Amino acid sequence: MNDGSVKILDGNTFVVSDARGDIEASLTDPTGLFSYDTRFLSKWVLTINGERMNPLSVDDLEYFESRFFLVPGTGTVYVDAKLSVIRRRAVGNGFHEDLTILNHADKAADLTVRLEAGCDFADLFEVKDALKKKGAYSTHVKNGKLVLAYARGTFARSTAISSSQRARVDKDGLTFKIRVGPHGKWRTQLAVVTEGLGAEESEREEPAKAQRRMRKGLERWIEQAPRLECDSEPLQATYRRSLVDLAALRFSPRIAGGRSLPAAGLPWFMTMFGRDSILTSLQALPFTSELAATTLRALGDWQGVGIDDFRDEDPGRILHEMRYGELTAFEERPHSPYYGSADATPLFVVLLDEYERWTGDRGLVRELEVEARAALNWIDEHADLQGTGYVWYERRNQKTGLENQCWKDSWDSISFRDGRIPGFPRATCELQGYAYDAKLRGARLARLVWKDPAFAERLEQDAAELKRRFNRDFWVEDGEYFALALDPDGAQVDALTSNNGHLLWSGIVDKSKAKTVAAHLLGPRLFSGWGVRTLAEGEGRYNPIGYHVGTIWPFDNSFVAWGLRRYGFKDEAAVIAAGILDAAEFFEGRLPEAFGGYDRSQTMYPVQYPTACSPQAWSTGAPLLFLRTMLGLEPQGENLVVDAALPSTIGHLELLDIPGRWGRVDAFGRGRVDVGRRA
């Protein structure tokens, strides 16, 4: 299943078109050529003799390249074409397109080939929020190039369009008057180049060189990853798709010195996100550690140092989102960077510890000691807005800041059982789990690497007290699960949600309560057969296609499964893994951001969520984390422990050359867990 759009990308530059290769974007439509949060091309339409093309097929050659096979005309049954067209497009410094026209007739063809071009230079936030532009447009022809431009004060962006074949260029596009001989072909190379992003012309790669670099980089990325051998062909396809998409989503912010971290997702989030980059790096650790190292360094470099209400910044706070577009440049949005996330800061410490456990790289732990201590201090000094020892959030930027600063960040995601919305500040349950985990992991690093046993002991005492309070204050007695949040008065926001699985992952749940929590996660109100819903069926705001109020998020489920494994519920973790991996087959191995929460008995396939990001980093990472949980991979000192519990539907599985402080090792397992009725 896909939405019919064709996407190619490299870092945070991407192109989204229809199956013809055409782009016809509206102000609210995220199609076109985007780079650094600005749309550089919003119209790109091919006609021959005034006719639009009809798509025959599309080859997604690589994540950065696609090929469109087309014929003129719009026949509904069969097009008896004497001409065919191939558009081969590759992203890089904008994009480059080879346009080839083939004449299959025994007579010459006289053709008028037209490419309509235009650009609105929309900021991605303007596309998302349907906002109007405030600057001035200009169009001119210079040295055979069509230059589309936009300026607002010192903010200037332009797109230069050129062709290797001579064309008549006007302000709306390029026209070619050509003759193609009998059984002949005509070809031109089109360049659509982004300008105004700070790169000098001399620094830009030649298209062929850029494609070779990306192709070799992808080959190296795949070769260095562990090799999967298993009886399940769909799982093998999903695994490869995950590796390729993770490679595609690698983004090198200028602060990272050429190293890469995961951008959050296409089309809305092709940039550095604190929470998303951290969680994706955690998912990928058994397969590659380089994403985690870059994420930690980049987020450490951008860590908050002062109090800034516009950006919701505090000392020690880890950023939420970094943007480069017009609205950020004019401070109409706070993303330069914006710090409105309450979970990225404790998760920063969690990732640092997990990275060391896998890699043994204590050098990075020493390098980031100041940043890790500042993050731990933020939990106590800046996040406890109510003085209760919990992590709370409330935006200080009331106009453009995020209202909900947890991963379920839509406006209605936090609600009572009856659907009421609580006031602010809010203390969601998983934030307390992350803080607990961060304190224990920080204590381990303090004792082992920073050689500060007194600090370690204080952190451990704080964590123990937090766990005791949490299991008292958040436990919903009549439902035997943990409340979604506390409201400003300390009352339980008592909806049943998937957040309970994150609590298991953090370790904050008392063992005496874990069994009933696991039963809820696998019960019919939360588990659909495809996965665990964000909000339980029957709650006041439940909606199977509501963003955070009933949909199924693959990333969410991967951490729920990890939490179940932590408390010994191996079979239950395998059931969740099986459901999501079954769903992946219907998405051609590429799990979307979210899909519908309908019960599996109602649908023979998972129902698409209408505006889900795809590819999306932490959905791409979900199959990787499921492999870890199914195989029971856990670093113990210098060794990797394997304790497999695989769904019976998978059969035999081998994950070979798993990298870590032990060098490279192999893990084996055979599917023995009955995952129940299959649809």
Image (cartoon, rainbow, N blue to C red):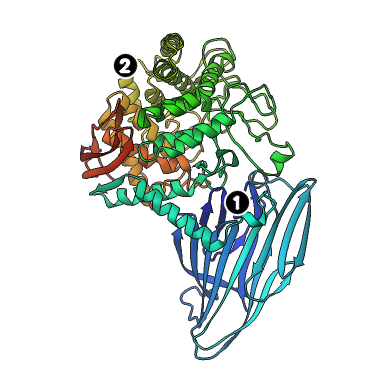
> What crowding class fits label 2: few (fewer than 14 Cα within 10 Å), some (14-19), or many (20 or more)?
few
Find residue 523 and report its horizontal and vertical position in percent. Answer: 33, 30
Q: Residue at x 67, y 49 (%)?
A: 197
Residue 153 at what x, y percent from top left?
80, 46
Q: Nearer the viewer, residue 352 or 47?
A: 352
Q: Which mark is residue 30?
A: 1
Residue at 41% across, 41% down = 621
The answer to whether residue 525 shows anywhere in this view is no
Q: What amino acid type should be assigned to the residue bearing mark 1? A: Pro
Front one among 114 and 144: 144
In the image, is residue 595 above or below residue 636?
Answer: below
Real-space Cα separation, disc 1 to disc 2, in angstroms:
47 Å
Residue 582 relative to residue 138: left or right: left
Query: Is 43 on the left-hand or right-hand side of 631?
Result: right
Q: Position of residue 170 (x, y in %)?
A: 74, 70
Q: Is residue 114 above or below residue 605?
A: below
Q: Describe residue 462's horizontal placement relative to residue 325 as left or right.
A: left
Numbered tag placed on residue 17 in the rendering: none
Nearer the observer, 619 or 98: 98
Residue type, label 2: Lys
Q: Secondary structure at mark 1?
A: loop
Q: Quadrant of the N terminus?
A: bottom left
Q: Residue furthest bottom?
A: 107
Res 138 quadrant in image: bottom right
Q: Which sits earlier in the primary sequence, circle 1 or circle 2?
A: 1
Residue 511, disc: 2
